[in-house]
Image: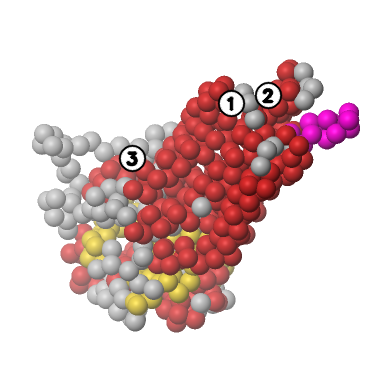
Amino acid sequence: MQQKVMNKTSLIYWASGIVSICGIVFEVLFGALGSYILGDGVKQYTLTISLFLTGMGIGASISERVTKNLILAFIYIEFFVALIGGFSSFTMFGITAYTPEGTDAFYLYFVTLIVGTLTGVELPILIRKANEIGESLNRSTARVLFSDYAGGLLGGLLFAFLLRPQFGIVKSAFLVGLINLAVALIVLWLFRSEVKRLAIHALVGSVIGILLILGVFFGEETAFSFEQKLYQDPIIHMEQSQYQKVILTQDREDLRLYLNGGLQFSSIDQHRYHDVLIHPVMSQTKQHDHVLILGGGDGLAANEILKYDDVRDITLVDLDPAVTDLAKTEPKLLDLNNRSLHNDKVTIKNEDAFNYLKASDQVYDVIIVDLPDPNDESLNKLYTEEFYSLVRNHMHPEGAMIVQATSPVFATKTYWTIDETIRGTGLETENFHLDVPSFGNWGFVMASRNPIEADKLEVTVPTQYLKSSMIPGMTEFGKDEDREITNADGEKVELRPNTLVDPHLIEIYQSEWKHY
């Protein structure tokens, strides 16, 4: 009899640890889901963690009223967590694809609050049950909480290093739901003598199990069809890398790459973008021995640079190996980038650009900063004065750099804040913009220790778009897109550099782009 009591007590402690692992996984999964679909990772993780913890507080309060049938209450809580949490990612994609804008955000926050509330009810019930079967209140509380907190660490590590990279967001949710369900069914079996209508409860659990198993095998495929609705062209490649969702689409001749839903290029007009990104800055410098590309994992910038015979080596630093591997293996991308990443002159380093510059002592004649827009905290640091100071310090005294700087039309203050930030490092700047149909009007900032004279820049290699005579005109900006920005009262807006201590650029960016 004593052995049976010990087995039941041990099961309660194990159950608390396992459900805690599942709860943490769902918490960070909701943050990742919001970051991917809704954007602004810091905001989404902040909201989902806050809502989840608030839900746990609500659940703990509700648990005061659960004083009878503790085991059955715990089992059905796990049933609900398994069902709601397991289908959370799957249904989020469906809602995003088929409902009005804003519904997906409301759904995600609602589900986060509900799962958090259910998780908050679990622990007090387990503590009460452990106390009921013979453990002292102090001992049962301490052990259940220890299992809960230790499980939290394991859950975070499990999601970061196994579930998300190996199974993706949709399948991971179904798998974690199955673990919740398994805990419920094991508890149901071990405490079967305390449960009436055992067969009915087992049947309910079995039905949920069948639904979750179907989700594991077919949910991702169906979610893929939902996600296809988010893109105007058919998806020909999709993968969830360690860092982002990588999507390649194609409609006739138009090949497009998306990272976390953001368009990176369209094959129809990418030559316009890359002509202006590469050739003016190459003209600014007399020598091109050593070239650094920060970003540009698709190989398109490298392809333009390789047109210069005097280039001795190109170092391409792109965080995500999934992008550079795709650019080296996908036949359609190989045709577009002319196999540039296979060229002996190109060395690929899959590292964070900031960390690479901190560790490297190499000096470059030309530096191309072709990074995604500063739409989250991790990217924002690559648009700070500290980062541009690192870039400057790796630039040859006679060298030059150029930065893609988003749209001066759609995000005017963002564009000129980037320019102000680069100027804050003591460099001279010149500003260029052009029309790229797939993006709209797009801007670049060139910087050098020497004055930049746009009318003396020349295109000396074959191009599809850019001519030397066009370059001076690209430095002219209309009244509604130039540096003299005014607020609603007609007062001039003062620009200040974006820094690690004062990372205000991300707020400006999000405010300006929210209507586009």
What is the x, y in percent for residue 262? Answer: 38, 59
The residue at the point 24 percent across, 62 percent down is 440
Q: Residue at x 21, y 54 (%)?
A: 409
Residue 507, numbered label: 3
Pick whichever of labels 2 and 3 is earlier in the sequence.
2
- Disc 3 residue crowd, few under 14, some 14–19, many 20+, Cα 10 Å: some
Badge 2 element:
helix
8 within the magenta span? yes
- What kind of element bears circle 1? loop
The location of residue 278, given as percent across then percent down, is 36, 67
The segment highlighted magenta reads 1-12
- The residue that mark 2 highlights is 128
- Closer to the chain start, of discs 2 and 1, is 1
Q: Say few, some or many: other residues with alpha carbon within 10 Å of mark 2 (under 14 / 14 to 19 / 20 or more).
A: some
Q: Which mark is residue 66?
A: 1
Q: Position of residue 511 (x, y in %)?
A: 28, 43
Q: Amino acid at mark 2?
A: Arg
Separation of disc 1 and disc 3 at Cα? 45 Å
Residue 485 to residue 251: above or below: above
Q: Verify CB contact (< 8 Å) between mark 2 and mark 1.
A: yes
